[in-house]
Amino acid sequence: MWDVPGLSLFLEENMEKILVLDFGGQYNQLIARRVRDHKVYAEILPYTTPIEEIKNNNYKGIIFTGGPNSVFDMESPHYSPDILDLGIPVLGICYGCQLIAWMAKGEVKTAPVSEYGKIEFNVLDNNSKLFKDVPQKSVVWMSHTDYIAIAPAGFQVIGNTNDCPCAAMQNTEKSIYAVQFHPEVTHSEFGNKMLYNFLYEVCGCHGDWVMDNFIENTVAELREKIGDKNVILGLSGGVDSSVAAGLLSRAVGKQLTCVFVDQGLMRKDEGDFVEQTFTSLFDMNFVRVNCGDHFMECLKGVTDPEEKRKIIGTEFYKVFWDEVRSRAEDGYFAQGTIYPDVIESGLGESSVIKSHHNVGGLPDHVDFKDIIEPLRDLFKDEVRKAGLELGIPERLVFRQPFPGPGLGIRIIGEVTEEKVRIVQDADFIYREEVDKAAADYKKEHGEEPSWMPNQYFAALTNMRSVGVMGDFRTYDYAVALRAVKTIDFMTAESAEIPYAVLNKVMNRIINEVKGVNRVFYDLTSKPPGTIEFE
Protein backbone atom coordinates (compact mmCIF):
# COMPACT_ATOMS: atom_id res chain seq x y z
CA MET A 1 0.00 0.00 0.00
CA TRP A 2 1.26 3.43 -0.84
CA ASP A 3 2.06 5.85 1.97
CA VAL A 4 -0.70 8.29 1.11
CA PRO A 5 -1.80 11.02 3.49
CA GLY A 6 -5.36 10.33 4.54
CA LEU A 7 -5.41 6.62 3.77
CA SER A 8 -3.74 5.18 6.84
CA LEU A 9 -6.42 6.77 8.98
CA PHE A 10 -9.20 6.51 6.46
CA LEU A 11 -8.71 2.85 5.64
CA GLU A 12 -9.19 1.62 9.18
CA GLU A 13 -8.82 -1.98 10.18
CA ASN A 14 -12.56 -2.59 10.16
CA MET A 15 -13.28 -0.74 6.95
CA GLU A 16 -14.63 -2.85 4.09
CA LYS A 17 -12.21 -3.22 1.20
CA ILE A 18 -12.44 -5.06 -2.10
CA LEU A 19 -9.29 -6.01 -4.00
CA VAL A 20 -9.38 -5.69 -7.80
CA LEU A 21 -6.51 -7.91 -8.92
CA ASP A 22 -5.21 -6.59 -12.24
CA PHE A 23 -4.46 -9.14 -14.99
CA GLY A 24 -4.11 -6.54 -17.76
CA GLY A 25 -7.76 -5.83 -18.58
CA GLN A 26 -8.87 -2.58 -20.18
CA TYR A 27 -11.80 -2.07 -17.80
CA ASN A 28 -9.95 -2.39 -14.48
CA GLN A 29 -10.59 1.18 -13.41
CA LEU A 30 -14.23 0.78 -14.30
CA ILE A 31 -14.58 -2.30 -12.07
CA ALA A 32 -13.15 -0.40 -9.09
CA ARG A 33 -15.41 2.57 -9.81
CA ARG A 34 -18.51 0.37 -9.99
CA VAL A 35 -17.61 -1.13 -6.62
CA ARG A 36 -17.15 2.30 -5.07
CA ASP A 37 -20.46 3.41 -6.58
CA HIS A 38 -21.98 0.80 -4.26
CA LYS A 39 -20.29 2.51 -1.27
CA VAL A 40 -17.59 -0.13 -0.87
CA TYR A 41 -13.94 0.90 -1.12
CA ALA A 42 -11.98 -0.83 -3.91
CA GLU A 43 -8.29 -0.71 -4.71
CA ILE A 44 -6.39 -2.08 -7.71
CA LEU A 45 -3.21 -4.09 -7.26
CA PRO A 46 -1.14 -5.93 -9.91
CA TYR A 47 -1.27 -9.70 -10.26
CA THR A 48 2.34 -9.75 -8.98
CA THR A 49 1.16 -8.77 -5.48
CA PRO A 50 2.39 -11.43 -2.99
CA ILE A 51 -0.32 -13.60 -1.48
CA GLU A 52 0.89 -12.74 2.05
CA GLU A 53 0.11 -9.07 1.38
CA ILE A 54 -3.38 -10.03 0.26
CA LYS A 55 -3.88 -12.17 3.37
CA ASN A 56 -2.88 -9.31 5.67
CA ASN A 57 -5.17 -6.65 4.20
CA ASN A 58 -8.50 -8.02 5.43
CA TYR A 59 -10.28 -7.86 2.09
CA LYS A 60 -13.99 -8.63 2.06
CA GLY A 61 -13.67 -9.94 -1.49
CA ILE A 62 -11.38 -10.22 -4.50
CA ILE A 63 -12.23 -9.53 -8.14
CA PHE A 64 -10.03 -10.99 -10.90
CA THR A 65 -10.06 -8.65 -13.91
CA GLY A 66 -10.14 -9.46 -17.57
CA GLY A 67 -7.06 -9.51 -19.79
CA PRO A 68 -5.96 -10.03 -23.40
CA ASN A 69 -4.13 -13.34 -22.89
CA SER A 70 -4.86 -17.07 -22.89
CA VAL A 71 -4.54 -18.84 -19.54
CA PHE A 72 -3.04 -21.94 -21.13
CA ASP A 73 -0.14 -19.81 -22.42
CA MET A 74 2.37 -19.97 -19.56
CA GLU A 75 3.71 -16.52 -20.53
CA SER A 76 0.34 -15.05 -19.55
CA PRO A 77 -0.38 -13.56 -16.10
CA HIS A 78 -1.11 -16.26 -13.53
CA TYR A 79 -1.51 -16.48 -9.78
CA SER A 80 -1.05 -19.09 -7.08
CA PRO A 81 -4.13 -21.36 -6.82
CA ASP A 82 -3.79 -20.89 -3.05
CA ILE A 83 -5.70 -17.63 -3.41
CA LEU A 84 -8.86 -19.71 -3.91
CA ASP A 85 -8.37 -21.29 -0.48
CA LEU A 86 -7.98 -18.09 1.58
CA GLY A 87 -11.63 -18.11 2.59
CA ILE A 88 -12.14 -14.76 0.82
CA PRO A 89 -14.97 -14.59 -1.75
CA VAL A 90 -13.73 -14.31 -5.34
CA LEU A 91 -15.38 -13.06 -8.53
CA GLY A 92 -13.62 -13.74 -11.85
CA ILE A 93 -14.44 -11.62 -14.91
CA CYS A 94 -13.63 -12.76 -18.49
CA TYR A 95 -9.92 -13.75 -18.31
CA GLY A 96 -10.40 -13.89 -14.53
CA CYS A 97 -13.20 -16.41 -15.06
CA GLN A 98 -10.98 -18.59 -17.24
CA LEU A 99 -8.12 -18.24 -14.75
CA ILE A 100 -10.29 -19.58 -11.92
CA ALA A 101 -11.24 -22.55 -14.10
CA TRP A 102 -7.58 -23.18 -14.99
CA MET A 103 -6.39 -22.88 -11.36
CA ALA A 104 -9.16 -25.22 -10.16
CA LYS A 105 -8.21 -27.89 -12.78
CA GLY A 106 -11.02 -27.21 -15.22
CA GLU A 107 -10.46 -27.13 -19.00
CA VAL A 108 -10.02 -23.91 -20.96
CA LYS A 109 -9.83 -24.01 -24.78
CA THR A 110 -9.95 -21.74 -27.79
CA ALA A 111 -13.65 -21.28 -28.47
CA PRO A 112 -15.13 -22.68 -31.71
CA VAL A 113 -17.05 -19.41 -31.98
CA SER A 114 -15.70 -16.18 -30.50
CA GLU A 115 -18.16 -13.77 -28.89
CA TYR A 116 -17.82 -10.01 -29.05
CA GLY A 117 -20.41 -7.39 -28.23
CA LYS A 118 -23.94 -7.72 -26.91
CA ILE A 119 -24.97 -11.36 -26.36
CA GLU A 120 -28.13 -12.85 -24.86
CA PHE A 121 -27.32 -14.52 -21.53
CA ASN A 122 -29.36 -17.26 -19.85
CA VAL A 123 -29.48 -17.71 -16.06
CA LEU A 124 -29.51 -21.44 -15.25
CA ASP A 125 -29.79 -21.13 -11.46
CA ASN A 126 -32.27 -18.55 -10.19
CA ASN A 127 -31.21 -19.31 -6.60
CA SER A 128 -27.62 -18.19 -7.14
CA LYS A 129 -26.68 -15.27 -4.88
CA LEU A 130 -24.98 -13.65 -7.86
CA PHE A 131 -28.21 -13.51 -9.83
CA LYS A 132 -30.63 -12.31 -7.16
CA ASP A 133 -33.29 -10.13 -8.88
CA VAL A 134 -31.68 -10.76 -12.27
CA PRO A 135 -34.10 -11.94 -14.98
CA GLN A 136 -33.82 -15.33 -16.68
CA LYS A 137 -32.64 -13.70 -19.91
CA SER A 138 -30.70 -10.47 -20.34
CA VAL A 139 -28.06 -8.88 -22.55
CA VAL A 140 -24.40 -9.00 -21.50
CA TRP A 141 -21.19 -7.69 -23.05
CA MET A 142 -18.82 -10.42 -24.25
CA SER A 143 -15.25 -10.12 -25.48
CA HIS A 144 -13.44 -13.48 -25.64
CA THR A 145 -11.83 -16.02 -27.96
CA ASP A 146 -11.24 -18.69 -25.28
CA TYR A 147 -13.90 -20.40 -23.17
CA ILE A 148 -14.38 -22.88 -20.36
CA ALA A 149 -14.89 -26.25 -22.04
CA ILE A 150 -15.22 -28.20 -18.77
CA ALA A 151 -16.00 -26.56 -15.43
CA PRO A 152 -13.73 -27.61 -12.53
CA ALA A 153 -14.83 -30.15 -9.94
CA GLY A 154 -16.92 -28.51 -7.22
CA PHE A 155 -18.22 -25.82 -9.60
CA GLN A 156 -21.76 -25.56 -10.94
CA VAL A 157 -22.52 -23.96 -14.30
CA ILE A 158 -25.10 -21.24 -13.57
CA GLY A 159 -25.33 -19.40 -16.90
CA ASN A 160 -24.77 -19.85 -20.63
CA THR A 161 -25.20 -18.33 -24.08
CA ASN A 162 -25.87 -20.00 -27.41
CA ASP A 163 -22.13 -20.27 -28.12
CA CYS A 164 -20.71 -20.40 -24.59
CA PRO A 165 -21.87 -23.41 -22.53
CA CYS A 166 -20.22 -22.04 -19.36
CA ALA A 167 -20.80 -18.29 -19.29
CA ALA A 168 -21.06 -18.28 -15.48
CA MET A 169 -20.15 -20.74 -12.72
CA GLN A 170 -20.02 -20.91 -8.93
CA ASN A 171 -18.55 -22.85 -6.04
CA THR A 172 -20.86 -21.97 -3.18
CA GLU A 173 -18.78 -23.84 -0.60
CA LYS A 174 -15.80 -21.55 -1.25
CA SER A 175 -17.87 -18.48 -2.31
CA ILE A 176 -16.15 -18.38 -5.69
CA TYR A 177 -18.05 -16.99 -8.68
CA ALA A 178 -17.00 -16.42 -12.27
CA VAL A 179 -18.59 -14.83 -15.36
CA GLN A 180 -17.28 -14.90 -18.91
CA PHE A 181 -18.82 -11.52 -19.71
CA HIS A 182 -18.11 -7.98 -18.42
CA PRO A 183 -20.69 -6.94 -15.78
CA GLU A 184 -18.87 -3.64 -15.19
CA VAL A 185 -19.77 -2.10 -18.58
CA THR A 186 -23.12 -0.42 -19.16
CA HIS A 187 -23.83 -2.72 -22.13
CA SER A 188 -24.45 -5.57 -19.64
CA GLU A 189 -28.05 -4.81 -18.67
CA PHE A 190 -27.93 -6.25 -15.15
CA GLY A 191 -24.18 -6.30 -14.71
CA ASN A 192 -24.22 -3.62 -12.04
CA LYS A 193 -26.83 -5.60 -10.12
CA MET A 194 -24.59 -8.68 -10.28
CA LEU A 195 -21.68 -6.67 -8.85
CA TYR A 196 -23.98 -5.38 -6.10
CA ASN A 197 -25.01 -8.96 -5.34
CA PHE A 198 -21.40 -10.09 -5.12
CA LEU A 199 -20.59 -7.29 -2.68
CA TYR A 200 -23.65 -7.55 -0.45
CA GLU A 201 -25.03 -11.08 -0.89
CA VAL A 202 -21.72 -12.96 -1.21
CA CYS A 203 -19.13 -10.78 0.57
CA GLY A 204 -21.52 -9.47 3.23
CA CYS A 205 -20.57 -5.80 2.76
CA HIS A 206 -22.55 -3.02 4.45
CA GLY A 207 -21.30 0.01 2.47
CA ASP A 208 -19.19 2.41 4.57
CA TRP A 209 -17.25 4.26 1.85
CA VAL A 210 -18.44 7.89 2.14
CA MET A 211 -16.83 11.15 1.10
CA ASP A 212 -17.24 13.10 4.32
CA ASN A 213 -15.24 10.50 6.25
CA PHE A 214 -12.47 10.79 3.70
CA ILE A 215 -12.22 14.58 4.08
CA GLU A 216 -12.28 14.49 7.87
CA ASN A 217 -9.64 11.80 8.16
CA THR A 218 -7.43 13.16 5.39
CA VAL A 219 -7.33 16.62 6.96
CA ALA A 220 -6.41 15.07 10.33
CA GLU A 221 -3.52 13.09 8.91
CA LEU A 222 -2.26 16.00 6.80
CA ARG A 223 -1.99 18.10 9.96
CA GLU A 224 -0.11 15.32 11.72
CA LYS A 225 2.28 14.69 8.82
CA ILE A 226 3.03 18.32 7.92
CA GLY A 227 3.32 19.66 11.46
CA ASP A 228 4.82 23.17 11.34
CA LYS A 229 6.43 22.76 7.89
CA ASN A 230 5.36 24.63 4.76
CA VAL A 231 3.71 23.07 1.71
CA ILE A 232 3.88 24.18 -1.93
CA LEU A 233 1.19 23.04 -4.35
CA GLY A 234 1.23 23.38 -8.11
CA LEU A 235 -2.25 24.76 -8.87
CA SER A 236 -3.53 24.48 -12.45
CA GLY A 237 -7.11 25.53 -11.81
CA GLY A 238 -8.35 22.06 -12.73
CA VAL A 239 -10.53 20.08 -10.34
CA ASP A 240 -7.74 17.75 -9.08
CA SER A 241 -5.28 20.42 -7.97
CA SER A 242 -8.16 22.60 -6.72
CA VAL A 243 -9.51 19.91 -4.41
CA ALA A 244 -5.99 19.10 -3.20
CA ALA A 245 -5.59 22.81 -2.41
CA GLY A 246 -8.90 22.80 -0.52
CA LEU A 247 -7.87 19.84 1.64
CA LEU A 248 -4.44 21.30 2.40
CA SER A 249 -5.86 24.72 3.17
CA ARG A 250 -8.32 23.23 5.63
CA ALA A 251 -5.48 21.25 7.22
CA VAL A 252 -2.65 23.82 7.50
CA GLY A 253 -3.95 27.22 6.34
CA LYS A 254 -1.20 29.77 5.67
CA GLN A 255 1.45 27.07 5.72
CA LEU A 256 0.22 26.34 2.18
CA THR A 257 1.47 28.27 -0.86
CA CYS A 258 -0.26 27.64 -4.19
CA VAL A 259 1.77 28.46 -7.29
CA PHE A 260 -0.39 29.19 -10.33
CA VAL A 261 1.42 29.62 -13.66
CA ASP A 262 -0.67 31.58 -16.18
CA GLN A 263 1.01 31.01 -19.53
CA GLY A 264 -1.50 33.17 -21.42
CA LEU A 265 -3.15 30.15 -23.06
CA MET A 266 -6.10 29.69 -20.71
CA ARG A 267 -9.76 30.25 -21.49
CA LYS A 268 -11.24 33.74 -21.26
CA ASP A 269 -10.96 35.24 -17.75
CA GLU A 270 -10.03 31.82 -16.34
CA GLY A 271 -6.83 32.98 -14.69
CA ASP A 272 -8.69 35.76 -12.87
CA PHE A 273 -11.44 33.34 -11.84
CA VAL A 274 -8.94 30.88 -10.35
CA GLU A 275 -7.15 33.63 -8.43
CA GLN A 276 -10.37 35.18 -7.10
CA THR A 277 -11.78 31.80 -6.09
CA PHE A 278 -8.81 30.64 -4.11
CA THR A 279 -7.90 33.94 -2.48
CA SER A 280 -11.47 34.44 -1.27
CA LEU A 281 -12.43 30.86 -0.44
CA PHE A 282 -9.37 29.47 1.30
CA ASP A 283 -6.79 30.54 3.85
CA MET A 284 -3.53 30.19 1.92
CA ASN A 285 -0.75 32.06 0.15
CA PHE A 286 -1.52 32.42 -3.57
CA VAL A 287 1.26 33.15 -6.09
CA ARG A 288 0.28 33.89 -9.68
CA VAL A 289 3.07 33.87 -12.25
CA ASN A 290 1.98 35.78 -15.38
CA CYS A 291 4.24 34.74 -18.23
CA GLY A 292 2.07 35.01 -21.36
CA ASP A 293 4.55 37.26 -23.18
CA HIS A 294 7.34 34.73 -22.62
CA PHE A 295 5.27 31.90 -24.08
CA MET A 296 4.20 33.97 -27.09
CA GLU A 297 7.85 34.70 -27.82
CA CYS A 298 8.81 31.03 -27.52
CA LEU A 299 5.98 29.96 -29.86
CA LYS A 300 6.72 32.59 -32.51
CA GLY A 301 6.84 31.01 -35.98
CA VAL A 302 6.12 27.47 -34.70
CA THR A 303 3.37 25.58 -36.56
CA ASP A 304 4.05 21.89 -35.92
CA PRO A 305 1.63 20.57 -33.25
CA GLU A 306 4.16 18.34 -31.50
CA GLU A 307 6.76 21.09 -31.43
CA LYS A 308 4.19 23.43 -29.88
CA ARG A 309 3.34 20.85 -27.23
CA LYS A 310 7.02 20.33 -26.45
CA ILE A 311 7.76 24.05 -26.15
CA ILE A 312 4.73 24.74 -23.94
CA GLY A 313 5.51 21.76 -21.69
CA THR A 314 9.22 22.54 -21.40
CA GLU A 315 8.75 26.24 -20.70
CA PHE A 316 5.97 25.60 -18.20
CA TYR A 317 8.24 23.19 -16.36
CA LYS A 318 11.06 25.73 -16.25
CA VAL A 319 8.87 28.62 -15.07
CA PHE A 320 7.09 26.54 -12.46
CA TRP A 321 10.14 24.92 -10.92
CA ASP A 322 12.12 28.19 -10.94
CA GLU A 323 9.33 29.70 -8.85
CA VAL A 324 9.01 26.66 -6.60
CA ARG A 325 12.73 26.26 -6.01
CA SER A 326 12.92 29.70 -4.46
CA ARG A 327 10.21 28.72 -1.96
CA ALA A 328 11.17 25.13 -1.07
CA GLU A 329 12.62 25.79 2.40
CA ASP A 330 12.78 22.14 3.42
CA GLY A 331 8.99 21.75 3.37
CA TYR A 332 6.67 19.49 1.38
CA PHE A 333 5.61 19.51 -2.26
CA ALA A 334 1.97 18.66 -3.00
CA GLN A 335 0.18 17.78 -6.23
CA GLY A 336 -3.24 16.63 -7.39
CA THR A 337 -2.36 13.09 -8.51
CA ILE A 338 -5.49 10.90 -8.70
CA TYR A 339 -5.93 7.13 -8.94
CA PRO A 340 -6.29 6.87 -12.75
CA ASP A 341 -2.94 8.72 -13.10
CA VAL A 342 -1.29 6.07 -10.96
CA ILE A 343 -2.96 3.16 -12.75
CA GLU A 344 -2.25 4.47 -16.26
CA SER A 345 1.39 5.11 -15.40
CA GLY A 346 1.78 1.47 -14.41
CA LEU A 347 1.15 -0.44 -11.20
CA GLY A 348 4.00 -2.77 -10.32
CA GLU A 349 4.71 -4.76 -13.46
CA SER A 350 1.50 -3.71 -15.20
CA SER A 351 1.82 -2.07 -18.57
CA VAL A 352 1.97 1.70 -18.86
CA ILE A 353 -1.04 3.14 -20.70
CA LYS A 354 0.37 6.66 -20.73
CA SER A 355 2.81 8.53 -18.59
CA HIS A 356 1.68 11.35 -16.31
CA HIS A 357 3.85 14.28 -15.30
CA ASN A 358 2.46 14.16 -11.77
CA VAL A 359 3.37 10.52 -11.09
CA GLY A 360 6.93 10.04 -10.02
CA GLY A 361 9.62 11.75 -8.01
CA LEU A 362 10.84 15.30 -7.63
CA PRO A 363 13.48 17.02 -9.78
CA ASP A 364 17.00 16.64 -8.37
CA HIS A 365 17.47 20.38 -8.13
CA VAL A 366 14.52 20.93 -5.76
CA ASP A 367 14.97 20.17 -2.06
CA PHE A 368 11.73 18.95 -0.43
CA LYS A 369 11.19 16.55 2.42
CA ASP A 370 8.57 14.50 0.55
CA ILE A 371 5.64 14.58 -1.88
CA ILE A 372 2.09 14.83 -0.55
CA GLU A 373 -0.69 13.48 -2.79
CA PRO A 374 -3.94 13.47 -0.79
CA LEU A 375 -6.12 12.42 -3.76
CA ARG A 376 -3.91 9.58 -4.99
CA ASP A 377 -6.54 6.91 -4.33
CA LEU A 378 -9.61 8.71 -5.65
CA PHE A 379 -11.31 8.53 -9.03
CA LYS A 380 -12.39 11.73 -10.81
CA ASP A 381 -16.03 11.52 -9.74
CA GLU A 382 -14.93 11.02 -6.12
CA VAL A 383 -12.63 14.03 -6.39
CA ARG A 384 -15.60 16.11 -7.56
CA LYS A 385 -17.70 14.94 -4.61
CA ALA A 386 -14.90 15.92 -2.25
CA GLY A 387 -14.68 19.32 -3.95
CA LEU A 388 -18.37 20.02 -3.37
CA GLU A 389 -18.04 18.91 0.26
CA LEU A 390 -15.18 21.42 0.65
CA GLY A 391 -17.36 24.25 -0.71
CA ILE A 392 -15.51 24.72 -4.00
CA PRO A 393 -17.85 26.33 -6.62
CA GLU A 394 -19.59 23.96 -9.04
CA ARG A 395 -18.15 25.95 -11.96
CA LEU A 396 -14.68 24.86 -10.92
CA VAL A 397 -15.57 21.37 -9.67
CA PHE A 398 -17.28 20.51 -12.96
CA ARG A 399 -14.81 22.50 -15.06
CA GLN A 400 -14.66 21.39 -18.68
CA PRO A 401 -11.63 19.20 -19.39
CA PHE A 402 -8.75 21.38 -20.52
CA PRO A 403 -5.51 20.14 -22.09
CA GLY A 404 -2.15 20.83 -20.47
CA PRO A 405 -0.89 22.89 -23.45
CA GLY A 406 -4.06 25.00 -23.17
CA LEU A 407 -5.35 26.87 -26.22
CA GLY A 408 -2.04 26.20 -27.94
CA ILE A 409 -3.51 22.97 -29.34
CA ARG A 410 -6.88 24.52 -30.16
CA ILE A 411 -5.19 26.97 -32.53
CA ILE A 412 -4.09 25.41 -35.81
CA GLY A 413 -0.75 26.74 -37.00
CA GLU A 414 1.23 29.51 -35.33
CA VAL A 415 0.00 30.77 -31.96
CA THR A 416 -0.30 34.57 -31.81
CA GLU A 417 -1.89 37.02 -29.39
CA GLU A 418 -4.61 37.80 -31.95
CA LYS A 419 -5.46 34.12 -32.42
CA VAL A 420 -5.57 33.54 -28.66
CA ARG A 421 -7.98 36.46 -28.29
CA ILE A 422 -10.20 35.11 -31.10
CA VAL A 423 -10.46 31.57 -29.72
CA GLN A 424 -10.99 32.84 -26.16
CA ASP A 425 -13.89 35.05 -27.22
CA ALA A 426 -15.47 32.45 -29.53
CA ASP A 427 -15.13 29.70 -26.94
CA PHE A 428 -16.71 31.90 -24.25
CA ILE A 429 -19.76 32.60 -26.43
CA TYR A 430 -20.14 28.94 -27.42
CA ARG A 431 -19.99 27.61 -23.86
CA GLU A 432 -22.27 30.39 -22.60
CA GLU A 433 -25.02 29.63 -25.12
CA VAL A 434 -24.81 25.83 -24.70
CA ASP A 435 -24.98 26.17 -20.92
CA LYS A 436 -27.94 28.57 -21.16
CA ALA A 437 -29.85 26.27 -23.53
CA ALA A 438 -29.20 23.28 -21.27
CA ALA A 439 -30.30 25.22 -18.17
CA ASP A 440 -33.53 26.34 -19.91
CA TYR A 441 -34.28 22.76 -20.93
CA LYS A 442 -33.66 21.46 -17.40
CA LYS A 443 -35.90 24.15 -15.92
CA GLU A 444 -38.73 23.12 -18.26
CA HIS A 445 -38.28 19.33 -18.19
CA GLY A 446 -36.61 18.65 -14.84
CA GLU A 447 -33.56 16.97 -16.38
CA GLU A 448 -30.60 17.73 -18.61
CA PRO A 449 -31.19 17.41 -22.36
CA SER A 450 -30.06 14.18 -24.01
CA TRP A 451 -27.87 16.20 -26.36
CA MET A 452 -25.83 17.81 -23.55
CA PRO A 453 -22.17 17.22 -24.48
CA ASN A 454 -19.53 15.86 -22.13
CA GLN A 455 -17.00 18.25 -23.63
CA TYR A 456 -17.46 21.27 -25.88
CA PHE A 457 -15.17 24.06 -27.03
CA ALA A 458 -14.26 26.33 -29.90
CA ALA A 459 -11.05 26.00 -31.87
CA LEU A 460 -9.47 28.24 -34.48
CA THR A 461 -8.66 26.79 -37.88
CA ASN A 462 -5.81 28.12 -40.00
CA MET A 463 -8.21 28.71 -42.87
CA ARG A 464 -9.07 32.23 -44.05
CA SER A 465 -11.81 32.88 -46.55
CA VAL A 466 -13.71 35.68 -48.25
CA GLY A 467 -16.84 36.99 -46.59
CA VAL A 468 -19.19 39.95 -46.77
CA MET A 469 -20.09 41.86 -43.62
CA GLY A 470 -22.29 44.87 -44.21
CA ASP A 471 -21.01 46.54 -47.35
CA PHE A 472 -17.45 45.33 -46.85
CA ARG A 473 -15.47 42.41 -48.16
CA THR A 474 -13.64 40.47 -45.44
CA TYR A 475 -10.85 37.93 -45.48
CA ASP A 476 -10.95 36.37 -42.04
CA TYR A 477 -10.60 33.15 -40.02
CA ALA A 478 -13.00 30.23 -39.60
CA VAL A 479 -13.88 28.98 -36.12
CA ALA A 480 -14.67 25.29 -35.57
CA LEU A 481 -17.09 24.22 -32.83
CA ARG A 482 -16.48 20.83 -31.21
CA ALA A 483 -18.91 18.95 -28.95
CA VAL A 484 -18.80 15.27 -28.05
CA LYS A 485 -20.72 12.68 -26.06
CA THR A 486 -18.49 10.18 -24.31
CA ILE A 487 -18.35 7.95 -21.25
CA ASP A 488 -14.61 7.39 -20.92
CA PHE A 489 -13.05 9.87 -23.42
CA MET A 490 -11.44 6.88 -25.16
CA THR A 491 -14.18 6.94 -27.80
CA ALA A 492 -16.59 9.75 -28.58
CA GLU A 493 -19.44 10.72 -30.88
CA SER A 494 -20.41 14.17 -32.05
CA ALA A 495 -23.13 15.68 -29.84
CA GLU A 496 -26.39 16.61 -31.58
CA ILE A 497 -26.73 20.15 -30.26
CA PRO A 498 -29.99 21.67 -31.58
CA TYR A 499 -29.60 23.72 -34.74
CA ALA A 500 -31.25 26.74 -33.13
CA VAL A 501 -28.54 26.81 -30.47
CA LEU A 502 -25.74 26.42 -33.03
CA ASN A 503 -27.27 29.11 -35.22
CA LYS A 504 -27.36 31.54 -32.29
CA VAL A 505 -23.74 30.72 -31.45
CA MET A 506 -22.74 31.31 -35.07
CA ASN A 507 -24.49 34.70 -35.18
CA ARG A 508 -22.91 35.88 -31.95
CA ILE A 509 -19.39 34.78 -32.93
CA ILE A 510 -19.62 36.44 -36.38
CA ASN A 511 -20.98 39.66 -34.89
CA GLU A 512 -18.96 39.84 -31.68
CA VAL A 513 -15.57 38.30 -32.43
CA LYS A 514 -13.37 40.47 -34.64
CA GLY A 515 -11.45 38.50 -37.26
CA VAL A 516 -14.00 35.69 -37.85
CA ASN A 517 -16.40 35.38 -40.79
CA ARG A 518 -17.22 31.63 -40.79
CA VAL A 519 -18.24 29.06 -38.17
CA PHE A 520 -18.05 25.28 -38.70
CA TYR A 521 -19.46 22.42 -36.61
CA ASP A 522 -17.17 19.37 -36.31
CA LEU A 523 -19.09 16.09 -36.75
CA THR A 524 -16.05 13.79 -36.52
CA SER A 525 -16.19 10.89 -34.09
CA LYS A 526 -13.24 9.47 -32.11
CA PRO A 527 -11.81 7.45 -33.77
CA PRO A 528 -10.84 8.43 -36.44
CA GLY A 529 -10.46 11.95 -35.05
CA THR A 530 -9.31 13.03 -31.62
CA ILE A 531 -11.39 15.09 -29.21
CA GLU A 532 -8.85 17.91 -29.31
CA PHE A 533 -7.64 19.41 -32.58
CA GLU A 534 -3.87 18.94 -32.23
Image: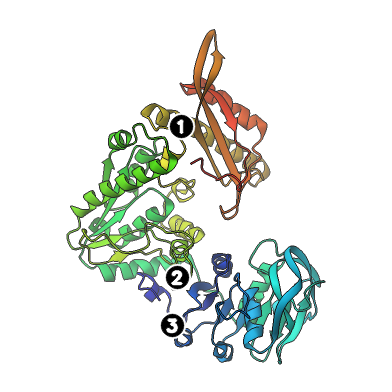
Q: Amino acid at mark 1?
A: Val
- Residue for point 34% across, 56% down: 245
- Residue for point 68% across, 73% down: 194
Q: Position of residue 353 (x, y in %)?
A: 49, 61
For residue 13, the mark is 3
For residue 347, the mark is 2
Q: Looking at the image, do the residues carrying marks 2 and 3 touch, with CB atoms under 8 Å apart?
A: no
- Residue for point 36% across, 31% down: 301
For residue 423, the mark is 1
Q: Amino acid at mark 2?
A: Leu
The mark nearer the N terminus, 2 or 3, is 3
Instruction: Please identify, in this view, whether the residue under mark 2 or under mark 1 is nearer the observer.
Output: 2
Q: In this rendering, does residue 308 appear at all?
A: yes
The mark nearer the N terminus, 2 or 1, is 2
Q: Position of residue 360 (x, y in %)?
A: 35, 64
Q: Amino acid at mark 3?
A: Glu
User: Is disc 1 surrounded by few (<14), some (14 to 19) or many (20+) residues within 10 Å?
Assistant: many
Q: Residue furthest top?
A: 471
Quarter of the N terminus within the rendering: bottom left
13, 299: nearer the viewer:
299
408, 371: nearer the viewer:
408
The mark nearer the N terminus, 1 or 3, is 3
Question: What is the C-alpha distance between the residues marked 2 and 3?
Answer: 24 Å
Question: What is the C-alpha distance between the residues marked 1 and 3?
Answer: 52 Å
